Image: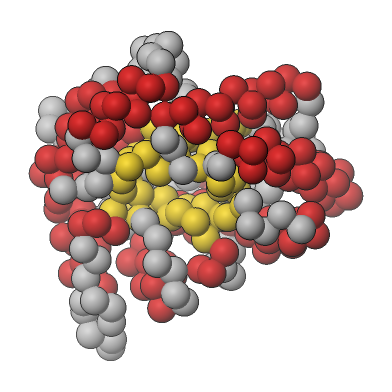
């Protein structure tokens, strides 16, 4: 049993409400009492793809009383090329200018680069190249292993090993994503190395674990098959003191005319599970 999480421990990823522009997204978070948000670079017509200057995003967050936790994300970060370097510099510059604390780093997920030696070498190369880019701008790198079988980085243990081998442990942390943790069958949680937790649930009883994809990712409720409450409880018991950020991808969630009541119910459900006495 854990104490309930105060609303200050929750964050909101713009993927939860991709139809809202940045100002309305910030207003949604503030209305819920959530003070930390993640912005994205993959939502057409929304910041940052709409060309909104970073200082305008920073000022809008400030007016709403919000902290921008991260920009999500540098894709294919462990396939280091001149193009990737340019993308990393652009995103890190934007993060620094808008006040974002971190940049989420997402690995290649198309079935390539999965051989042991190639995978590990690519990861280390990318981390070594990213470290000075992030350090010069005061931005943290959040490495997010994905549970999909097609992914080139599924293991948090492998990510930690690579980070330690580069000597850049002060610049990188893990993202623990409850969906991807479940898909990967990961046993170790690394709460002490975790910088952010993404939470979402899968309720569809007919989909096999290996077939779960982003559109299945709902808000966490009593039908959740991923064991979100258990994962959260273990992270807290291990000393994790950071944020739990809602990141649902399901079209049903995105179609809700007002997401606030559903988010409140999900927070209440999670806390009711954390407060439940052990059997």
Along the horizontal axis of the image, is 64 left or right of 185?
A: left
Quadrant housing residue 68: top left
Quadrant housing residue 9: bottom left
Answer above or below: position of 186 versus 61: below
Along the horizontal axis of the image, is 52 left or right of 273?
A: right
Residue sticking out furthest to the bottom: 279
Along the horizontal axis of the image, is 24 left or right of 180?
A: left
Along the horizontal axis of the image, is 85 left or right of 210?
A: right
User: Relative to the observer, which residue lies in front, 42 or 53?
Assistant: 53
User: Relative to the observer, which residue lies in front, 150 or 238?
Assistant: 238
Answer above or below: position of 45 versus 6: above
Q: Quadrant of the N terminus?
A: bottom left
- Could you tell me residue 118's position as x and y percent? 86, 44
Residue at point 35%, 49% (across, down): 245
Residue at point 58%, 55% (across, down): 173
Quadrant housing residue 148: top right
Answer above or below: position of 142 versus 18: below
- Could you tell me residue 98's position as x and y percent? 42, 29
- Could you tell me residue 276's position as x and y percent? 21, 79
Residue 183 seen anywhere in this rendered image of the structure: no
Residue at point 49%, 32% (across, down): 95
Answer above or below: position of 90 versus 17: above
Residue at point 16%, 48% (across, down): 33
- Could you tell me residue 73's position as x and y percent? 53, 33
User: Relative to the observer, which residue lies in front, 57 or 174?
Assistant: 57
Q: Quadrant of the C terminus?
A: bottom left
């Amino acid at each position: 049993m854990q104490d309930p999480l105060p609303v200050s421990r929750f964050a909101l990823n713009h993927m939860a409400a991709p139809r809202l522009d940045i100002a309305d997204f910030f207003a949604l978070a503030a209305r819920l009492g959530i003070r930390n948000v993640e912005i994205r670079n993959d939502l057409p017509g929304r910041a940052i793809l709409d060309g909104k200057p970073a200082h305008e995003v920073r000022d809008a967050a400030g007016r709403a009383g919000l902290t921008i936790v991260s920009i999500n994300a540098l894709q294919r970060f462990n396939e280091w090329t001149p193009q990737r370097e340019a993308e990393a510099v652009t995103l890190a510059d934007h993060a620094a200018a808008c006040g974002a604390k971190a940049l989420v780093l997402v690995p290649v997920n198309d079935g390539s680069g999965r051989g042991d030696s190639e995978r590990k070498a690519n990861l280390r190369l990318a981390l070594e190249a990213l470290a000075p880019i992030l350090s010069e701008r005061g931005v943290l790198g959040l490495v997010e292993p994905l549970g999909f079988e097609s992914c080139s980085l599924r293991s948090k243990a492998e990510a930690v090993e690579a980070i330690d081998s580069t000597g850049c442990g002060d610049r990188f942390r893990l993202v623990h994503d409850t969906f991807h943790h479940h898909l990967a069958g990961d046993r170790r949680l690394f709460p002490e190395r975790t910088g952010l937790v993404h939470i979402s649930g899968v309720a569809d009883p007919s989909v096999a674990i290996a077939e779960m994809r982003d559109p299945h990712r709902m808000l966490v409720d009593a039908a959740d098959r991923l064991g979100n409450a258990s994962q959260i409880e273990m992270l807290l018991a291990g000393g994790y003191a950071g944020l739990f950020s809602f990141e649902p991808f399901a079209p049903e969630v995105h179609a809700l005319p007002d997401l606030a009541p559903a988010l409140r119910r999900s927070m209440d459900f999670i806390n009711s599970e954390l407060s439940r006495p052990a059997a």
